[in-house]
Amino acid sequence: MAELSAALQRVLPNEEYLYRWVNLRESQTPLPAEFLSRWAPKAVEAYQRWLRPPADGPLERQEQHLRTRWEQGDYSLNEELTGFLTEVYPNEENWAFFTQSGQEAARTNRLMTLWQQAQSRRREHQHAQQLSRELPPFHSGLMARLTRASEAEKALRALLTDKDFGWDLEDGIGDEQDWEPLELCARQLGQDPELTRIAELIGRDWRSRQSPPPSPGRQAEPGKGEIRGITWGRAWSDAVSSELSLLASKETAEIFFVKEAESRLLVWDYFTPAAPPKLVADQQNALNRNERGPIIAVLDTSGSMRGEPEKVAKAAVLALARIAWQENRPCLLINFSSDVRVLDITDLKHNLSVFLAFLRFSFHGGTDLTPALREALKYLADGRFHDADVLVLSDFATPKIPAGLRTALRRQQEQGTKFYSLTVTTRPLNDFLNIFDAGWTYDIHPDRPRGISADSVTGSGIS
């Protein structure tokens, strides 16, 4: 017996007509084994929902009314009940023999038994007739939904994640979905692996949240040890490549020396851990469950980002969505241009259509980063995103940040939040806003190597 009909027989053993009919259809048009092994349980659930018992009609209500009165001893129904049973069940019994008034209890009990049996046979027959009418179109529709869902899942496994979304067929997944924007973003991301690396860097890891104490009696190992991120400093040997590139011309070298004098160079943040202590159970569970924390992406969707910057920005958002969904990490997208829009892309199972709509969206409008940063601070204040890190993606053709907002950002940084920038531009830019802990530049100048310097995202603290 085919897999789907066998599953129906196990789950719905009393629906013989159903699983025999489905078995016949499967034998006529076999479905791929991998298709059924993945979706047969979903199909069985759909059949179970569809097979809800029908509501009682006038005949059932009249029959129940007569039964109740007869069981209560109202034998004045003799002729009415005889006529009803003879009309509804003409070939069953000699109903007049059992409905004579004043009969003993044994004959009345026998009437109830025969009546119940006749009623069950009638309902089974009506149910089979109903199935014969309604099952073919339902089965065809269900197979169409299964096919669309399977194709959607294949597309998403190739473009977004291998993780099971756990969709139900009632979710309508795959119905009139346009996968082309997702395909374009995935293709762009494939050309820029550094975007995926940056997505992996964003979010505080378990060490920064748990801070296990050093083991007593153990000495720190010599040397610089590990890199845990990027910070400010003045050591040339520790400077990231984007800062050292300022020395390539006289015009930008002056900027480098000013930043060096003020200890404002972006340098690798080294630390030398002692030999790690034995982790307690809850720390080990946290490490196994989720190594990195939530993400807030603040994305410039203004008109100045249209074209190549828009493609890069959307690919970066796709990289963040992949990482967050795969690792069960909360991820929030704050879009800003003339206004601010917030999209929670944590639960792609239910928000996939909204996410695809974002990928189809064409950037336009003015640029104002300030409201978007204020919105990010609201989410950092409480809830699932209180220990998130923030990545701002923009060409940074934006006004200065007000002093009060800069103070609020500094206060948030003192609590451990990291603010990162990804600048998509044709010209080398520094953090002229002076608010970020670290940043990367995606160069789109036609006369220079395109993309992000691989050195700027190498060895950034991910073990």
Image (tube, grey):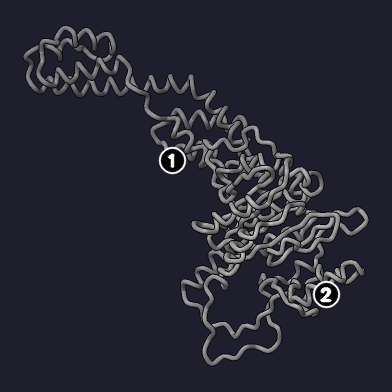
Q: Is residue 268 left or right of residue 128?
A: right
Lateral position of residue 415 relative to residue 227, left or right:
left
For the C terminus, which image quadrant? bottom right
Q: Amino acid at mark 2?
A: Phe
208 w.r.t. 344: above or below: below
Does dot 2 land on a helix, a strand or a loop? helix
Q: Nearer the viewer, mark 1 or mark 2?
A: 2
Residue type for callout 1: Arg
Total count of labels: 2
Q: Is residue 267 left or right of residue 339?
A: right
Measure the alpha-carbon separation of dots 1 and 2: 77 Å
Residue visible at 76% across and 62% down?
432
Residue at the spot x=19%, y=19% of the render? 67
The percent position of residue 409, horizontal first and vertical second, equals 61, 62
Disc 2 designates what residue?
A: 257
The reply to whether residue 174 is visible in this rendering is yes
Q: Are marks 1 and 2 in contact (CB under 8 Å)?
A: no
Asked whether 242 or 58 is in front, the reply is 242
Residue 251: mark in rendering: none
Residue tagged 1: 10
